[in-house]
Amino acid sequence: MAMLIELILRKAAQEAIRLGNRYLCTEHVLLAMSMNSEARQLLTQCGVNPDTLKEHLKLYLETEVEMVSGSNNEEVLPTPAYREMLERAKKHSQREMERAHEREGKENGKGEEDGKTRLLGLLLAMMDQKDSFASYILSSYDISSHTVQASVMTGGVIRATWLKELCDYYDDDSGSDDPEDDDEGVELCNDDLEDEDGREGEDYRQWHRERESDLQLSRCTDSLTMRAADGKIEPLIGREQELKRALRVLCRRKKNNLLFVGEPGTGKTALAEGLALLLFQSRFQETPVRVPEELRSKEVISLDMAALLAGAKYRGEFEERVKEILDALIARGNVILFVDEIHTMVGAGATVECTIDAVSLMKPALAQGTLRCIGTTTYKDYKAYIENDHALSRRFQKIDLAEPTAQESYEILKGLQKDYEAHHGVSFSDETLRTAVDLSVRYMNDRFLPDKAIDLIDEAAAMIRTAEEGRTKNVLPGDIEKLVSEYAGIPELRINVTEQKRLARLEEDLKANVFGQDEALLHLARAIKRSRAGLGAPARPVGCFLFTGPTGVGKTEAARQLALCLGNHFARYDMSEFMEQHAVSRLIGAPPGYVGFDQGGLLVDEIRRNPYTVLLLDEIEKAHADLFNILLQVMDNATLTDNNGRKADFRNVVLIMTSNAGARELVSTTIGFTSSAEDSRSKSEKAIEKLLSPEFRNRLDATITFNHLNREVVLMIVDKLIRQLNQQLEERRVVLTVSEKAKTKIADEGYDPKFGARPLARFIANEIETPLADEILFGKLQKGGALRIEVDKTSGEFHFLFPDAELPAKSGRLRKIPAKAR
């Protein structure tokens, strides 16, 4: 035997003795090769990292191969697989040397032995043993016997044409070999087993049975500990309390099984992977969370349910697979099984004739503590699949994972920042990370932190990578805002404005759009600012207001403009739809047994989707009395629970109710007499007290009364309506001008104190928009033009004039329409 091979085999035996292993295996030889300089060169040419290979092999040999009891370990027993490998290595070496001489044109095939050829034979012999860990770890580098041979002959540079010729050459040549050669190793193994005494022969057979179980284990599982050793698991940030609780549960004698329960995207899988990383790191260094000694050698293995179910066609085949894997894990003893989405195991493999599923097969091992298991699931799936199965739920210790706060999510993004910067080749500023967290909380309400914030920075970086050349490689807050506007369907300008700026000009913006109600808007703006400053009750909505006053004076419009000024979602519910008792259930969902029980409630779903909402309950006096009882808990605790147990959070909701109660008393006010006005207001308040119970009124932040509109305010409303009409006419390239006398006529004839400003819109529609529509469709404004409305001095009616005017062309420029063309 060549000196190089002898050195490697001697080193393999020394490593087996040093590691305290009882048997000398193929993996010891591969470990020795990873330490030899010439063998390392061969492995590198084949695309294998010798250092990583060495770490994997050491971990395997320390945890999987039987150890010698006691401290005296002066010799090791070679396994049948080891002896079979040596025999196959000789044949591979002889065959390779003969082919090498044939290619060089030599007649004699027994030339001088080449060290590299013998190493090649040793490596090929290891790959022939498909059920060994050495073959498995080599195949994980995507290499085969053909690629190994090609890389040696080409010096590590594998050309496609040369590789094809080699594959064809070996495929043709392999058929001429004696088929009995491949069985000699197996026969030798059997002879060796029979030559051993009874005890050692049985040990060998037991070892082979474990090898077969390990083969099934490798198909359906993935080692998280191996991934941690390769640096493929991202570090866990935060969650120290959950980690400490998990370690306590795993150290229990019985029922040492964990179940992480939380909303999707809150980090359940990341916590399990972080636990595997913590256990691995604790072997070599001090960790932030102390790991007990008995857990440091544990290997966390993830179960792939798809691979477990794939191809199981016959009855009993799936159960056999599950039982085989469980027995293998229990036999190894140092394994923690991780099952992501563990609820998928409930019912897996069960049929009409046989109700035994995968979970039923696991229950005995879970109860006895012989198998430690970690599972993850959501609250919804836990309630549907696990909570009802008391025999299963009591075997797991439930650990709830709450959604991290905005600050915790920011720290998570800071911890992941380097990984995403390295992957995308961009950079993130602290402001960008905070923007991602804040905007995801505000506008992406159907998802949870930190997942939605991570998605934002990931896609923003991808957007920079796919942008045109010359674009800066810095991800800016504006990039996050653009993404959020696409996600939430909100104009980017509304996202760009900070809340501080909105609050600073809130009163001014409200007065610019709602006329004649300055006192009411002042009370509303002050209440909103108090809440945003943190001076309000933390467990209540932002504000609960009751708007009272005559119809048509701006109550509904004030709520709509408040939503626009705050940048919040606006939701309006007409209480005339909830006059009956059964209709109230639409807000929180139908009770069990009724139609629509599984659909949830309108109000709960609305607030869950849009936590930042201005909620308007219009004409509250028309609603059934049961609605007020539902609103009591909203106004007091800022929560509302639907028929499925889902809670909606109202802490960021502005609740506004409008009422016309007492409007008749206000209308009857005699202008100019203070005492009469005070009496009417007192009567209005009494009408509201009659409508609302004391406990309901006591939970209101303010009852804001809207006054009648005076003449000056009515003229301002007329101007606003004319501006809105002009905006509609821009598409038709028509410019409308209304004289002051015409505006006065609209205000005098269109306004009615009993009905407020709403008749103004009807008056403009009948007297101005109807004739204007005829002109646009059939008359002088078909191609656009200018229109001026005056009041005829004789008849007092509206008079339509078509003077020359500068009109905006489609290109945006001004052009003059001649009188003849009109």
Image: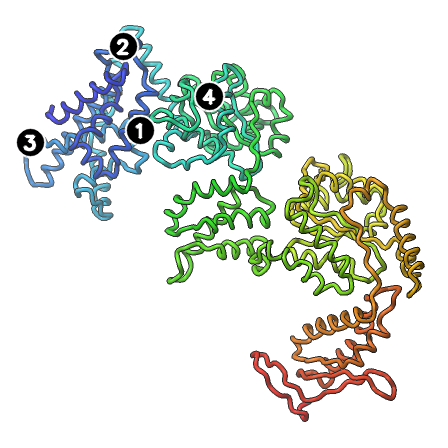
Residue 759 x, y percent position in the rendering: 83, 68
User: What's the amino acid at mark 1?
Assistant: His
Count residues near mark 2 (Cα–Cα under 10 Å), then give few for <14, some for 14-19, many for 20+. Answer: few
Of labels 4 and 3, the one closer to you = 4
User: What's the amino acid at mark 2?
Assistant: Ser
Q: Is residue 225 left or right of residue 170?
A: right
Q: 67 and 440: which one is in front?
A: 440
Q: 417 and 60: which one is in front?
A: 417
SS assignment at label 3: loop
**Mark 2 or mark 4: whose residue is earlier in sequence:** 2
Of labels 3 and 2, the one closer to you = 2
Residue identifier under label 3: 112
* 468 w.r.t. 259: above or below: below
Tell me how far mark 2 sits from mark 1, CA to CA: 25 Å
Of labels 2 and 1, the one closer to you = 2
Tell me how far mark 1 sits from mark 4, CA to CA: 23 Å
Residue 762 x, y percent position in the rendering: 82, 70
Of labels 3 and 1, the one closer to you = 1
SS assignment at label 4: helix
**Mark 2 or mark 1: whose residue is earlier in sequence:** 1
* 397 w.r.t. 687: above or below: above
SS assignment at label 2: loop
Location of residue 605 by image quarter: top right
Residue identifier under label 1: 56
Q: In this view, does 45 lie to the left or right of 673?
A: left
Tell me how far mark 3 sits from mark 1, CA to CA: 35 Å
Q: Inspect this view and state whether residue 229 appears.
A: yes
Residue 391 x, y percent position in the rendering: 60, 20
Residue identifier under label 2: 71
What is the count of numbered marks?
Answer: 4
Residue identifier under label 4: 326
Count residues near mark 4 (Cα–Cα under 10 Å), then give few for <14, some for 14-19, many for 20+. Answer: some
